Image: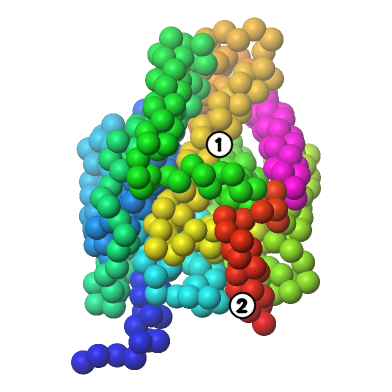
Amino acid sequence: MSIPLLLQQRLMLLAVCITAITMPFNFTAAAVALPAIGRTFGGSPMELNWVTNAFMLTFGSCLMLAGALADNYGRKKVFIGGVSAFALLAAVLPFAPNLALFDVLRAAQGLAAAAAFSGGMSALAQVFDGPGRIRAFSFVGTSFGIGLAFGPVAAGAMIEVFGWQVIFLLITLLAVISLILATRYMNESRNPEAAGIDWPGAISFTWALGIFTFAILKAPESGWADPLVLGLFTVALLSFVAFVVIEQRVTQPMLDLTLFRFPRFVGVQLLAAAPAYSFVVLLIMLPIRFVGIEGMSEVVAGWLLVALSAPLLVLPIVAGYLTRWLSPSILCGSGLLVCATGLFWLSHVPVGSSAAELAWPMLLIGVGISLPWGLMDGMAVSVVPKERAGMATGIFSTTRVAGEGVAIAIVTALLSAFTAGHLGGTATPDIVGAAQHLATGDLAGAMHLLPAAGRTTLAEGYSAAFSSLLLVLTAITVLTAAVVFLFLDRGSVKDDSDTELDEQVLDQAA
């Protein structure tokens, strides 16, 4: 029996939204569970970092390819394949016999997540038009907010009562529900003008981004001057050059390089990367600090993180209403400045402070990032024809997710370096090792390497390093806000794209 078209669209949207909830939950829950996973498997600080890094590496590297596959071979097919693999891998993770295999499974889960995300987002762009499309993407953004706001709380409670393994079983359950809805209610679609996958471009780009991200992730462990790290950066650079040459010669490139001539398109990409340094890295670093260094329980740490992520449940929708009076650049740039204020405030809250002292600046950061959050995805899709929505979501999502992976790696390296500097003037192997343990929340491991330092000295060194790191993130966020103010409202991909976008956003707010 057929159902009304409107109901079918809403059920399809629900399927994508449920998947959108699992993505940040899969990301933040692993961060909350990292100390518990370390107690189960053991492993060095760098090996434990790959619990999050492996997922981010493959997720960010493969989004462009997944978007191209969705446009060419079918958005529903790619979405269902991705969600199915994502659910299966989440179910297998709790039974991994060792940390090495666990990290490999997390990398495979990132591949599946890339297919699910790109397929689902490009499928929505075909079903919804005009203001309806903006509203649909706003719901997806709100779903991400739900995963971010309640993921740490749910993960902390489940870890304390049942163990860390159950969080991945919950992810499996949510993914199965999404899969059932999509199988029944999502229509198949593809780009009718697609001439096949630009495989040389897809392979060269995925390879280049993967190698570059791996080099960034490897650097904190081996050192930035390590021959292997330098070699990886060289290979990545040459691969990116090869990708640009390939894209200039093919008829239908995976990435239309001419888009970068338009300031607004560039502004959207910069905006996509902005939350990585002003918000997302905190979702990883703060749970490690709260549980590993400050000694909070996973439940308490999860509840405290609500202050950071809860504004995403409401304020993205408010941002849509504010576009009646304010331009997107004003909203997005102002939001980043609010984030910067919160980061600066948090840098003056040392380890051992009360929950209230921590919560207020975290809340301010969450309020600031919520203003651009609800506008980003819809703006990304609106800058290209909807037939190539897979490419648009792929470019935007790659910038966002790859930026998050690189940001996490760089921030972890900076925190480790700052901590080593505060622990001693000379970077001896024991000091460097202790700093790496502290950066991953392993205070006991740091004490084992530096027993004479004592718990208080180690915690104070970490606290000073964390403050220095937040000041760096403050400066980056302020600079990004300035660029957004300058670029976001200038130019467009086609003469009427800006007008169309503004009308859609205003219609949503009405």
Q: Residue 20 lies in what quarter of the image?
A: bottom left
Q: Residue 326 lies in what quarter of the image?
A: bottom right
Pointer 1 local density, CA inside 10 Å: few below 14, some 14–19, many at least 20: many
Given residues 126 and 476, the one toward you in this image is: 126
Q: Quick check: 360 above or below 315?
A: above
The residue beneath circle 2 is 508
Identify the image quadrant of the N terminus: bottom left
x and y percentages locating residue 358 in the rendered image: 71, 49
Left-right relation of 78 to 404: left
The residue beneath circle 1 is 407
Q: What type is the residue that disc 2 sits on?
A: Gln
Q: Magenta region: which residues?
A: 459-486
Q: Residue at image x 51%, y 11%?
A: 225
Q: Quick check: 224 above or below 509?
A: above
SS for callout 1:
helix
Q: Residue 62 lies in what quarter of the image?
A: top left
SS for callout 2:
helix
Left-right relation of 335 to 103: right
x and y percentages locating residue 212 in the rendered image: 44, 28
Confirm or deny contact between disc 2 and disc 1 (CB under 8 A). no
Q: Quick check: 100 above or below 377?
A: above
Pointer 2 local density, CA inside 10 Å: few below 14, some 14–19, many at least 20: many
Q: Main secondary structure of the magenta part?
A: helix
Q: Is residue 397 magenta?
A: no
For marks 2 and 1 on the same chain, the one whose residue lies earlier in the sequence: 1
